Image (cartoon, helix red, strand yellow):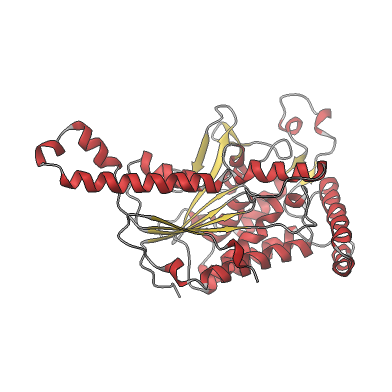
Amino acid sequence: MRARLPFDRVVLLLQGGGALGAYQAGVYQALAETGLHPDWVVGISIGSINAAIIAGNAPERRVDRLREFWEEITAPAMGFDADVVGLFERGEAARALANQVSAATVACAGTPGFFRPRLPNPWFHPPGTIEATSYYDTRPLKATLERFVDFDHVNSDNCDTRLSLGAVNVRSGNLVYFDPGTQVIGPEHVMASGALPPGFPAIEIEGEHYWDGGLVSNTPLQWLVTNTRVTGQRMPDALVFQVDLWSARGEFPRNLAEVATRQKEIQYSSRTRAFTNFIKLLHKVEYSVATLLDQLPDEFKQSEEAKFLASRAQRHAYNLVHLIYRPRGYEGDSKDYEFSRVSMAEHWRSGYHDTIRTLRHPEVLERAGNGEELTIFDFAGDRD
């Protein structure tokens, strides 16, 4: 059953982060159990895959389909995951080693239903061929997406959840978003959003090639805000859940391994908090402009300047809820391609419990004031 909210729309924004994407699935499970089914889900990279599974299935089937997908791509090999469980009692060093072995296995052999290494190596393929441009073949993902996502439903006028997917045009370098409102969405659009080079090949769509949208911005929040303004659309009152897999904040690294980890965190967090502060200021300016325009004499409202400002001024309530994955001490720079079943379950549980803790705060689901303020929630310090 859908929760009754003082908002017109529930939006779910899903960042990229590879194997960490199971965290987003856990977040969605908690939202679904609370009756918070999104009207609009926007994804980049692994976030696009989760988003497509959510939008491409009926609400009552989404959690099951997400779990089936994540269990398939993290299928245990040779009982390795069973051995990992015993390492919990041996401390973080033992677990870190197990994660490194798991990540190395994925790097060498790929992961089921997702990607596999190119044989022969791309350096042995002729220049100009798609095989010469990536280390892995992602064709297994196409068949997987076709099994887990009902693309006819995604593109149907009756679809209850809008889907948007971020990718970057390789030739122009521009970030674009695929959306059923402008084109028919298929598995290739999801794959394009997650085509991170040089690991994965660019995906060709209508004569153009696309890479992972995270190369430009790994956080869909910026597009959500700027898109509604550039197009002149009026953003309705919205409850927005921003689910990030990389934390912008972290400790100063102590060695080269930690330098690599911290580099990824900074690069792929896409400065979520900094941009959040910017849109908070922008929201305040828009509200103030709208209020001032109401006070203008009618003759001034007809000026071109006033009409332009009126087209940009907005009044709406906006609750922005941050849910950001915080890695454990034994996770290193390979955590985004460490696809063990044990780690997947950990990430899923973290997303679920972080969301449950956040929703214990009733103010998250309440419309604050008259739309003058953008209300931001981040309960990162609430972990038990």
Picture mark count:
0
Residue 14 appearing in the image: yes
Q: Residue furthest top?
A: 127
Please indicate whether residue 237 sits to the left or right of residue 321 in the image.
left
Quarter of the image where one finds residue 76: bottom right
Q: Residue at x 30, y 49 (%)?
A: 287
Quarter of the picture holding the C terminus: bottom right
Q: 254 or 167: nearer the eye?
A: 254
Residue 51 screen position, x and y as percent: 56, 56
Quarter of the image where one finds residue 217: top right
Q: Residue at x 67, y 68 (%)?
A: 349
Residue 147 screen position, x and y as percent: 64, 59
Residue 280 screen position, x and y as percent: 42, 49
Q: Residue at x 45, y 47 (%)?
A: 224
Quarter of the picture holding the N terminus: bottom left
Q: 120 or 241: nearer the eye?
A: 241
Residue 31, compared with residue 294, is above or below; it is below
Residue 182, compared with residue 174, is above or below; it is below
Residue 192 screen position, x and y as percent: 61, 42
Please indicate whether residue 65 sits to the left or right of residue 332 in the image.
left
